[in-house]
Image (cartoon, helix red, strand yellow):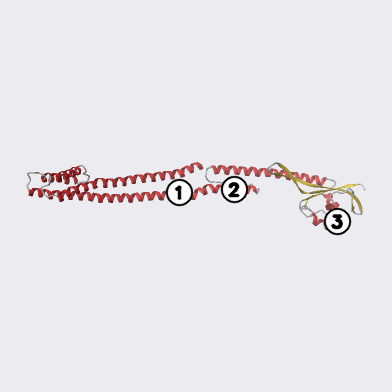
Amino acid sequence: MKIKKKLLLGFGLLFIVVLIFGATSVYYIEVISETSNVTLKNNYKTLTFTREMRSVLDENDLPLPSGASGVFNQALQKQENNITEPGEKAATSSLRQAFTLLIEPSSGLNQKQQAERTARLQLKKIEELNMRAIEFKNGYTHLTVNKATLYLGTMVFITFFILFILIVNFPGFILNPLRELADGLDQVSKRNYGTRLKFSASDEFTQLAEAFNTMAENLGDQENADLTKIIAAELRIKILIEEIQNAVLGINEKQEILFINHEAKRILNLGEKSLIGQSVLELSKNNPLLKTILENDDVEDPLKINQHSNGSYFQQKSLEVVVPNLKTDLDSLQVAGYSAGKIHFLKKVNS
């Protein structure tokens, strides 16, 4: 899976969770709001109407004055248009019958008193029905709030869990392959061309690892090819030096012998053992002729060397090996050089 798809999947999942969280929050807010609104709007109005009708009965003697009857009738009409609870309609109908008898001119005082008691009983019943409804709706509201709290808390936990996974894994998901790539490049810079990267996922990092492995393999092949060429060139030079009739001695910048042919060993009386890598300064301590050659680069007069009671003359010549070194600055590309050693020649001349 590509990195882009992984990112889209992770953040898409997080987006969906947040969307569900928001939708759930809005839903329960609407439910709680609606429940609270119904409780306040309908039942509270009914309690207001019953209070008005009870006040009329409490504040007036029988028979009721026409003004008080009008107030009672208006409150009763409002109540008849605001019936919401089971049993409230029957109680309101009974209240209407009692009120009709209460204001009937032909009714006696005893009948009016009985109608008043009935009206009060129905008012009490209506109030009890609405009070129970308020308690029930209040409990339902609390239950809804608790449920919403549980659901929203669960959604918050899931959202936090997904965020935690992203925060913990995302840096490693990006940084770990980059760290391995940096380590691989460090190994290649140290000429460890056998270094290989391998990522299990099929993403851009895998493609990068394949490109890195191809590069390392090509560099290794190139180095092997260059090394083969260098070895071949070194062998050719070695053979050429051995075939030269003149004495040849090569030393590096550390004053160590790089090459010396058979003729140089014979003239300098250094024996036949291998001298490659040995210090010429140490060898010259017990070899005055070698010391003379090292201390005198070029001399015009031939150098006389006694060999087996016979004296021969040799012309000495020394060449310093200067290796170019490219140094780049901000203004131009300059070529500088440093000494990589010397080559000393001894050519036999006629006395």
Tell me the mark number nearer the camera, choosing from 1 and 2: 1
- Residue 148 percent across, percent down from the top left: 34, 49
Q: Secondary structure at mark 1?
A: helix
Residue position for label 3: 288
Which one is in front, 107 or 127? 107
Tell me the mark number nearer the camera, choosing from 1 and 3: 1
Say few, some or many: other residues with alpha carbon within 10 Å of mark 1 (under 14 / 14 to 19 / 20 or more): some
**In the rendered picture of this protein, how many numbered marks are placed on residues?**
3
**Residue drawn at the location 55% of the way across and 43% of the way down:** 206
Q: Are marks 3 and 2 in contact (CB under 8 Å)?
A: no
Say left or right for 246 vs 33: right
Q: Earlier in the sequence, mark 1 or mark 2?
A: 1
Which one is in front, 213 or 48? 48
- Residue 309 percent across, percent down from the top left: 92, 54
Tell me the quarter of the picture where residue 282 sits.
Answer: bottom right
Say left or right for 253 vs 71: right
Residue position for label 1: 163
Q: Amino acid at mark 3?
A: Pro
Q: Secondary structure at mark 3?
A: helix
Which one is in front, 260 or 109? 109
Structural distance between the alpha carbons of marks 1 and 3: 82 Å
Can you tell which mark lies on residue 182? 2
Say left or right for 260 vs 110: right
Asked if residue 284 shows in the view, the reply is yes
Q: Amino acid at mark 2?
A: Ala
Q: Earlier in the sequence, mark 3 or mark 2?
A: 2
Q: Amino acid at mark 1?
A: Leu
